[in-house]
Amino acid sequence: MQDQRDQSGDHAARSLRPWVLWLTSGLIVVAVAALAAWTMFLRPIDVQAAAAVRDVPVQVFGLGTVEARISSDVGFQVPGVLVDLGADVGDRVVKGAILARLDDREQNAQVARANASVALADANLQMATASLDKAQANSANAKSISKRQQSLLKNSSTSIEAAETAQAAQDAAIADVGVAQSAVLVAKANIRDAEAQQNQQSTILNFYTLTAPYDAMVTGRLKELGSALGTGQPVFRLIDTKTVWVRAYIDESKAGEIKLGDPAEIMLRSSPDRRLSGRVARIEPESDRVNEERKVEVAFDALPVGFNIGEQAEVYIATVRLAKALLIPEAAVVGLGTKAETIWTVEDGRLQQRHVTLGHHLLDGRYEVTGGAPEGALVVTRIQSGLRIGRAVKVAEGASR
């Protein structure tokens, strides 16, 4: 009997065992599902978000080179042999400083000859003036004699022949005065011609000396001593350092908001860790038709020491400053470029999705949100799994700015 009861108990236990296992497994599945549901839908999710920031510069970027608006290749106006050089590359020279000289011995001889011609013409003028004085005196004497002879003829105190001879002498004396006056005019014309020749030769002599046309820096010495030069052949290359700037090329699609006077930052290739301040000095009215770029010249606020003409430079021109802006990375915009852009926001600690309008595009890839986001909302800056409208979030420490 006891054996029968034991066998009956074992049978009942074996009958209950599957149900217990099934119930336990079900409870485990429910617990796991509940945990997964809580993790996926209820647990606050960590997100990276950013708040509005203030005083944001909107910049456009361009590549260019350091150039000088005033740059000159200077040489002599006359041919000759170079006998003196007074400047070298890198020198600063003031306006009028002597840069070089040509062999001027032959021209000095021409000047001396012109000076002698002036002296000769002056002597001839003095002779002609003296001859005129003499002719005028002879004319006055002849006139006086003729007048007396005419008076004596009326009183029959002289002959008709004597009176006529006196009159003829007077007429001849008057003619001599006219000749002498003409000689004086010729002498004066000759002296003016000689003085003009003198000025011309002296001016040409000045051309044998090359001077700086303005305060300048020598950036090139193109000839050396003993060189035989032709007219106008360059000897030095000069720049006006006050006109040094960066000629930058800006994409036409970015250049529309650039204005004269806009502040800029300049980074020279030789100093990549240093940014120099500058201003937009000129906007070229003609774009490059091939590269679709606009030329913009940016002047330095303070010319850097040791600059190099032709050096590559980067410019960052601030076209606008945003007093306050909500900014979002490109990757955080859903449907970018479709005119139906949406972003994720954090509002009162929970996620929301908003249709927004975008404004300026910053050089670092962020966009300005100009509409659609509530005041004070944080913008989720990185798309990740688990984002759902209404879900509680925890903003990652240091992500909000």
Image: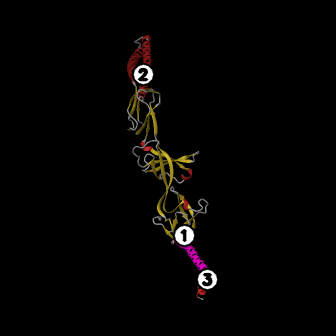
Q: Which residue is mark 3?
A: 11
Look at label 3 and name its amino acid.
His
Magenta: main secondary structure equals helix
Q: Alpha carbon of mark 3 to alpha carbon of mark 1: how far? A: 57 Å
Q: Secondary structure at mark 1?
A: strand
Number of the front mark, 3 or 2: 3
Q: Residue at coordinates 46% horizontally, 66% vertically from top-left? A: 397
* Gap between marks 1 and 2 measured at Cα: 107 Å
**From mark 3 to mark 2, how far is it between C-alphas?**
160 Å
Residue 390 vertical position relative to residue 332 in the rendered view, above or below? below
Mark positioned earlier in the residue sequence (1 or 2): 2
Helix, strand or loop at disc 2? helix
Residue located beneath label 2 in the image: 187
On residue 351, the disc is: 1
Residue 56 drawn above or below residue 46: above
Give the percent coordinates (x, y) of residue 377: 51, 68
Which one is in front, 59 or 85? 59
Between residues 95 and 25, which one lies in front from this camera angle? 25
Residues in magenta, as a range? 16-44
Residues 96 and 358: in front is: 358
From the viewer's perspective, is 142 left or right of 285?
left
- The correct choice, above or below, for 357 with respect to 106 in the image is below
Residue 88 visible somewhere in the drawing: yes
Q: Is residue 21 within the magenta segment?
A: yes
**At 62% across and 81% down in the image, what residue appears?**
15
* Amino acid tagged 2: Ala
